[in-house]
């Protein structure tokens, strides 16, 4: 019995995806719930499992095709999941057939008339995209394939150095990269972005980590990093300057009295921003665990749509890649994003003396429609004070 493999619900407001990769090919045996195909959306990747054991009988969409929720991706011949039957032994040599036969297709994959037309015209029906329900191939689909003009042969190239085209590669944007590009353009066209900078002496935090990291890791099972300090410092600054934890909605301003902090991380397909929920209610250990878990999910393509929605403020750390300074771009509809950078030993003046200190430059990009320069500068000063005197974070002063 043929079982349809359908595009599952993809999440709120997401109606289409791109077929990223088929893990099986027609004829392969599959087990129930085995991942058959990977779908890519503009936010997450989704594994579509086999609805039952059996063998994959046909594929309706190839890798790179766009599909919509509910469409039939392919057909599964339900069974015990045994391997497909081995081809029979070759028969004794015989007179060659007058014409090669077209590959067979299941009744559910194509109509009898379509198969007949394909056989007569030596068309591989498995390569024909069907227009019928569930991707079923009709006669007109085969005829359309026959009438499609052949790709003209490339003209002969003159002798001499090869053109640039021979050294270039054209690759279609992934849905995630396309969405990132759209959101970057959206941010630049809808917000009045401005960036302000400051520097932070990381000496006290580094000393605190060195003193307590082993005990911290033994007790909590996670290393004490810098991100938890910056999340806590940002929350304190957001409480003092609520405009930076708000968004503009038409002619209204929505102030958020909760602190869901997005942390930009590198996933397998690019930059994503999962959200640490209720960061103001988490201690340093909980924050480190939350960030670590989200980072692992991002690298393994296991982020759910819910992990990426609803942030009120974002932190991005270009320092892990060696960035000295940058102007981060807002994550709409948020009005602020904090940029962290690498830590470099620099000569600075302290009490009339030049000393070497571990310095990090930090940047705040903000929406000037809602946030004035005074608030933006004071926000960074508050972050700087919390990091340079980390006991304030622990004592909540």
Image: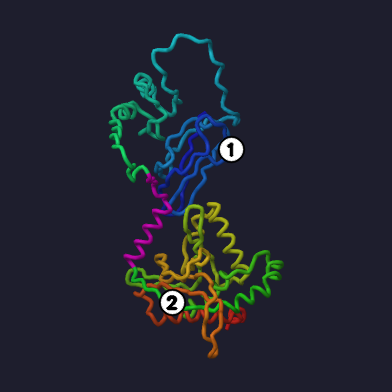
Tell me which label, 2 or 1, sits earlier in the chain. Answer: 1
Distance Cα–Cα, label 2 vs label 1: 55 Å
250, 81: nearer the viewer: 81
334, 100: nearer the viewer: 100
Q: Give the range drawn in magenta.
A: 167-190
Q: Where is residue 247 in the image (x, y as percent from the top left)?
A: 40, 70
Which residue is labeled 1 in the image? 32
- For residue 296, what is the image quadrant? bottom right
Give the SS element for disc 2: strand
Residue 298, placed above or below residue 60: below
Label 2 crowd (10 A; few <14 / some 14-19 / many >=20): some
Q: Which residue is drawn at 54% across and 88% down?
A: 353
Label 1 crowd (10 A; few <14 / some 14-19 / many >=20): some
Give the SS element for disc 1: loop
Q: Which residue is drawn at 41% across and 54% down?
A: 177
Q: Which residue is drawn at 62% across and 79% down?
A: 394
Residue furthest to the front = 160
Is 159 positioned to the left or the right of 99 in the image? left
Q: Is residue 185 magenta?
A: yes
- For residue 250, what is the image quadrant? bottom left
Q: Position of residue 201 (x, y in %)?
A: 54, 79
Q: Does the magenta stretch include residue 139?
A: no
Q: Where is residue 20 in the image (x, y as percent from the top left)?
A: 46, 44
Which residue is labeled 2 in the image? 197
Contact between labelled residues 1 and 2, with CB atoms less than 8 Å apart: no
Residue furthest to the bottom = 352
Residue 117, placed above or below residue 262: above
The C terminus lies in which quarter of the figure? bottom right
Residue 323 got which mark? none
Q: Residue at x 38, y 45 (%)?
A: 167
Q: Position of residue 381 (x, y in %)?
A: 48, 81
């Amino acid at each position: 019995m043929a079982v349809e493999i359908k595009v599952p619900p993809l999440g709120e407001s997401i109606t289409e995806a791109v077929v990223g990769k088929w893990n099986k090919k027609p004829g392969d045996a599959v087990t129930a719930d085995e991942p058959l195909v990977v779908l890519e959306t503009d936010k997450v990747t989704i594994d579509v499992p086999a609805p039952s054991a059996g063998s994959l009988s046909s594929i309706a969409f190839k890798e790179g095709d766009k599909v919509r929720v509910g469409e039939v991706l392919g057909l599964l011949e339900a069974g015990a999941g045994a391997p497909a039957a081995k081809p029979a032994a070759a028969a004794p040599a015989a007179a060659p057939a007058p014409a090669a036969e077209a590959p067979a297709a299941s009744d559910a994959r194509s109509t009898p008339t379509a198969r007949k037309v394909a056989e007569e015209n030596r068309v591989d029906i498995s390569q024909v995209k069907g227009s019928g329900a569930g991707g079923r191939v009709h006669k007109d689909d085969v005829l359309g394939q026959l009438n499609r003009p052949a790709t003209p042969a490339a003209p002969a190239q003159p002798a001499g150095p090869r053109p640039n085209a021979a050294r270039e590669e054209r690759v279609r944007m992934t849905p995630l990269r396309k969405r990132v590009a759209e959101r970057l353009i959206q941010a630049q066209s809808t917000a009045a972005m401005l960036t302000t900078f400051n520097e932070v002496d990381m000496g006290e935090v580094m000393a605190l980590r060195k003193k307590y990291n082993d005990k911290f890791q033994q007790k909590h099972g996670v290393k004490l990093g810098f991100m938890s300090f910056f999340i806590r410092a940002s929350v304190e600054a957001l409480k003092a300057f609520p405009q930076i934890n708000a968004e503009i909605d038409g002619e209204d301003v929505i102030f958020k009295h909760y602190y869901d902090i997005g942390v930009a991380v590198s996933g397998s397909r690019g930059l994503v921003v999962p959200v640490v929920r209720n960061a103001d209610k988490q201690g340093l250990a909980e924050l480190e665990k939350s960030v670590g878990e989200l980072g692992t999910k991002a690298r393994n393509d296991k982020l759910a749509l819910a992990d990426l929605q609803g942030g009120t403020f974002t932190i991005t750390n270009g320092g892990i890649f060696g960035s000295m300074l940058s102007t981060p771009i807002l994550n709409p509809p948020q009005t602020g994003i904090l940029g962290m950078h690498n830590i470099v030993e620099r000569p600075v003046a302290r009490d009339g003396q030049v000393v070497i200190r571990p310095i990090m430059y930090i940047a705040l990009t903000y929406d000037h429609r809602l946030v004035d320069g005074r608030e933006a500068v004071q926000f960074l000063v508050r972050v700087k004070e919390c990091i340079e005197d980390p006991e304030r974070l622990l004592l909540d002063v």
